[in-house]
Amino acid sequence: MNIISIILQAQQAQQGGGGLSLIIMMVAIFAIMYFLMIRPQQKKQKELQKFRNELKKGDKVVTIGGIYGTIEEIPESGNYVMMRVDTNVRIKVAKSSIVRDFSDAQQQ
């Protein structure tokens, strides 16, 4: 059963002032969706943006594509970082592609 059919059944069960109860139920469903889906995603995005803004030289990070490396340089332009992925191998990576920290404590 989907949500709309449940709402319609509830409205049919009440023969009197069903219009008001329908509006209340719709508001309740929206509130539940907001607190279970939208709000946690916004919080996660804010934490990720804060993490990217606080990157510094020497941080071990992972990119969206799964590349593990160490931050070597962060230019003042701020849109990218130079990352060392192996001995004598440096790549330029957009800050927006860095998704998490990979410290020595997290390695297996």
Image (spheres, helix red, strand yellow):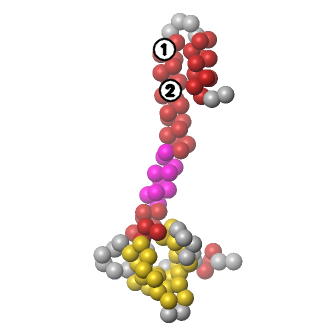
Q: Is mark 1 on a helix, strand or loop?
A: helix
Q: Is residue 89 above or below residue 15?
A: below
Reading the chain from its start, which is encountered first: label 1 or label 2? 1
Q: What element carries label 2?
A: helix
- Residue at 49%, 40% in the rendered image: 34
Q: What stretch is highlighted in magenta?
A: 38-47
Whole-percent x and y of residue 105?
62, 77
- Residue at 49%, 22% in the rendered image: 24
In magenta segment, residue 39: yes
- Residue at 53%, 24% in the rendered image: 25
Name the amino acid, label 1: Gly
Q: Between 87 and 18, which is closer to the camera in this rendering?
A: 87
Whole-percent x and y of residue 40?
51, 49
- Determine the image quadrant of residue 108: bottom right
Please name the residue that numbered disc 2 is placed on: 26
Q: Residue furthest left?
A: 77
Could you give the CA–CA distance between mark 1 and mark 2, rounded to whole angstroms? 11 Å
- Determine the image quadrant of residue 79: bottom left
Give the crowd class for mark 2: few <14, some 14-19, many >=20 residues within 10 Å: some
**Left or right of residue 94, residue 29 in this image:** right
Q: Residue 19 carries which label?
A: 1
Split into 4 quadrants, where in the image is the N terminus?
A: top right
* Count of residue discs: 2
Prevailing SS of the magenta stretch: helix
In magenta segment, residue 4: no
**Left or right of residue 108, residue 3 in this image:** left
The answer to whether residue 58 of the structure is visible from this angle is no
Q: Residue furthest top?
A: 16
Whole-percent x and y of residue 13?
61, 11
Q: Between 91 and 56, which is closer to the camera in this rendering?
A: 91
**Left or right of residue 46, residue 60 in this image:** right
